Amino acid sequence: MNKKYILYARKSTDVEDKQVLSIEAQLVELRAYARNERLEIVNEFIEKKSAKTPGRPVFAEMLKRIERGEANGIIAWHPDRLARNSIDGGQIVYLLDQTRLANLKFPTFWFENTSQGKFMLSIAFGQSKYYVDNLSENTKRGLRQKVRRGECPGRAPLGYINDVRTKTVIVDKTNAPLVVEAFERYSRGDQRLQDIADFLFTKGVKTKGNIPLKKDQITKLLTNPFYYGHFRYAGEVFEGKHTPIISKKLFDDVQIVIERRKHRRTTKHNDPKPLCGFLRCGSCDMMVTGENQTKRQKNGNVHRYVYYHCTKKRKNSPRCPEPHVREELLDEQLSAMLKEYAMPKAWADKLRELMDTDQANECARSQSQTTELQTIIAQLAAKLQRLLDSYLDQDIDRETYTNKKAEIMSQKKGFEDKLSKLTLGQNLWLEPMEKWIETAVSICKIANGADLLAKKSLCLEIFGSNLILKTKKARLRAPEAQFSPQKNRWVLLRKTIISQTKTDASRPSLQICPNLVRVKRL
């Protein structure tokens, strides 16, 4: 197959006065190398971009042409011209593995398309990446040392110039007085940022587009501590060795004016009302929200109220007819609903007695079942051992042994699972049941109190999302009869309280307590 090569030359920057001879020197050397080696060059690619990170457009275009079969070789000065990062280097090696790229030629590096050659190429790419990483670390170390010496890295701001001879920052005799005057003008408080920009523009300080400096550029200038002898680096302020052109007092006066004129964004703060988030409108099914209202009387008295109403955010529907309701009225309704679920203390004491009895009975029953299961498992283990002995004594053949062994092991595993579930499931209902009893007993105290958040939490636990607000009254969305008492302890408790009240409020019957314990696992 005829080998066609692409010549690739690269330098690390697109600034013309840096590495100015790099591209030209590479082209001359590579063309001469191709003539001497009698290599056919089908195209030349020149790129002025660093290879530290992926994303070089010219390099990507070269690889696309190779994948299309327009060329099958690359000529470059050194592997570091092709890649200084792991992704670009990996692409080159992958193309070699796929035979899309047949060969690479370097005047300064030996390469053959063999396993050893690709190994050496990978080492060269790794060395190039190490050089870039090490150069970055050395550069950062040098910058940190420069900062420790009090020298600000980077370009000097307006009013200063970088002296290339001494590698220091010196005062610009032309623009420094203009910067000082800009600070003095703004510190008086009678000029805007635009006025400062216009003043500097009249003195010849402008952007590359021949227009006045932008407001943010003026703000950056007026807040730069460089002018009074300090400088910022990596978010920290350091003391500099350069000559300050303004006093610290003048700088502080300017900061006071900037802070006073700073536009502060004000947002309306609306604290969420405690009874929001669990009631829905009875007409349009939207959520109920709350808002503050202030009423001022002619005698100077001010009254503040909280009203709850439908959010009325449903689109393409008639306006919601539901009126608003005062927080005090809604609180009174919810408290009355909660009191219907309050458990008498005598009932709670009786329930705890029944729980203790039930726990003791369950422990005894569980212990009996555990012992029985352990006995069965031990018997099956003994059967397995006897079966193995019979097989080893050649009393039974292998097929009989394997079939019987699988049967006994399956039975043993089933009983072990039952034992595990029995051990883990013992008395898991006690803690939730005790917590529920404490909640039921505390309902009266919470309902009579002023803590609206506690009432809301109770309503969510008892009613869930089944509460609506209709005609200024909180009520259940679905009739309580739809909820099975055997599946809801709160429904059962309320029915018990109502039934007992009708019978004799002074002599509470406790016959229902076993039924309450029965639903403890729900």
Image (cartoon, grey):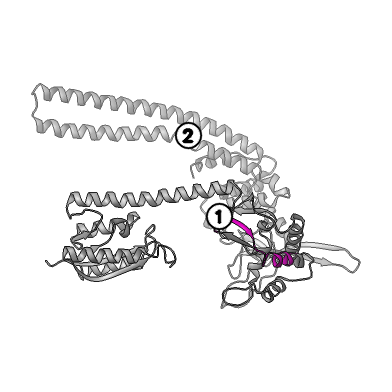
Q: Residue furthest front?
A: 165
Q: Identify the image quadrant of the N terminus.
A: bottom left
Query: Badge 2 is on which residue?
Result: 427
* Secondary structure at numbered mark 1: loop
| Residue 59 placement: quadrant | bottom left
Q: What amino acid type should be assigned to the residue bearing mark 2?
A: Asn
- How crowded pointer 1 is (Cα within 10 Å; few <14, some 14-19, many 20+) is rated as few
| Up/down of 243 relative to 7, above or below | above
**Mark 1 or mark 2, which has the lower sequence index?**
1
- Whether residue 164 is visible to the viewer of this picture, yes or no, is yes
Q: What amino acid type should be assigned to the residue bearing mark 1?
A: Lys
The image shows residue 325 at horizontal and vertical percentages of 71, 65
350 or 421: which is nearer to us? Answer: 421
The image shows residue 429 at horizontal and vertical percentages of 49, 38
| Up/down of 403 relative to 70, above or below | above
Q: Is residue 169 shown in magenta?
A: yes
**Magenta residues?**
164-183
- Whether residue 511 is visible to the viewer of this picture, yes or no, is no
Q: Is residue 406 shown in magenta?
A: no
374 or 175: which is nearer to us? Answer: 175
- How crowded pointer 2 is (Cα within 10 Å; few <14, some 14-19, many 20+) is rated as some
213 or 166: which is nearer to us? Answer: 166
Q: Residue at x 48, y 34 (%)?
A: 427
| Residue 13 placement: quadrant | bottom left
For marks 1 and 2, give the CA distance.
Answer: 80 Å
Q: Nearer the viewer, mark 1 or mark 2?
A: 1
Query: Badge 1 is on which residue?
Result: 167
